[in-house]
Amino acid sequence: MGSLLFQGGDIQVSKQTENQDLNEQTAEETATYTEAEGIKAEEAAPEAPETENGGGEAAAELEALRKQAEENQERYLRTQADFDNFRRRSRQEKEDFAKYASSKLVEQLLPVLDNFERAMAASKDSRDFDSLLKGLDMIQRQLGQTLEQEGLKAMNAEGEPFNPEFHQAVMQVESDEHGEGIVVEEMQKGYMFKDKVLRPAMVKVSK
C-alpha cells in the first residue's frame, strides 16, 4: 500500500487506484500514438490509380488526335495535288502563248497575201507591167500599214549623225555635202519595234 503526504498527515491510497490511473494514462498515450501513426500512414499512402473512366478519357483524346492527324495529312495531299495541277496548267498556257503568239499578226497578213496572189494572177493574164507595178505598190503599202499597227516603224537614217545604237556602218566615203560622221546613204533600212531596235540600218558614213 502506498501513502501520500498531505498537510502533515498521511493519506492512504489503494494500489488498485494507482493501477487504474496508470492504465488510463497508458490508454491515452496509446490512442495519441495510434492517431499520429494513422495520419502518417495517410500521408505516405500512394495515390490511387486512375479509374477506368479516366483511362477511357485518355483513349478518346488519343483517338481524336489520331483523326486530326489523318485529316491534316489528307488536307496536305489535296493542297499538293492542287498546286501540281496549277503548275501544269500554267506551263501549258505558257507554251500555248509562245506557240500562238504570232497568230494575230499572221491573220492580219492574210489580206496582203490575198492581194499579192491576185496581182500575180492578173499579171499572167494581161502581161500589163503598169498594172502589176500598181498592184505591188498597193501590197507594199498594205503590208507596211499592217506591220506599223503592230509597232513596227522604219528608221530614217540618211542625213542623220552616225549612231552605233541605230546604225551599222559598212563603208566610209568622202562627201562634199556632209561633214564627218554623217550618214550619206542608207543601203538597208533599219526598223524599230516599239521602243526597241529590231534591226539597225546599214549605212555609208562620211569621213
Image (cartoon, rainbow, N blue to C red):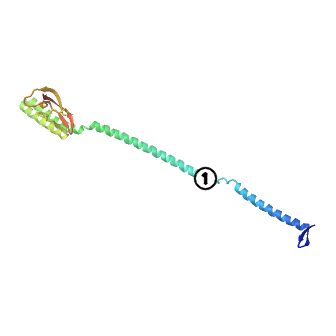
Q: Is residue 128 visible?
A: no
Which residue is outermost to the front?
8
In the picture, measured across the screen, residue 3 lies left or right of residue 37, that is right
Q: Position of residue 136 (x, y in %)?
A: 11, 33
Q: Position of residue 9 (x, y in %)?
A: 91, 73
Q: Quadrant of the N terminus?
A: bottom right
Q: Position of residue 203 (x, y in %)?
A: 14, 29
Q: Secondary structure at mark 1?
A: helix
Q: Is residue 42 visible?
A: yes
Determine the residue positioned at 43% across, 45% down. Answer: 79
Which image quarter: residue 124? top left
Determine the residue positioned at 6% across, 32% down. Answer: 130
Q: Residues within 10 Å of mark 1 (few under 14, many from 20)?
A: few
Which image quarter: residue 94? top left
- In the image, residue 64 sits, relative to residue 107, either above or below, namely below
Residue type at mark 1 is Gly
In the picture, measured across the screen, residue 65 lies left or right of residue 99, that is right
Observer-nearest residue: 27 or 52?
A: 27
Q: Quadrant of the C terminus?
A: top left
- In the image, residue 120 sits, relative to residue 4, either above or below, namely above
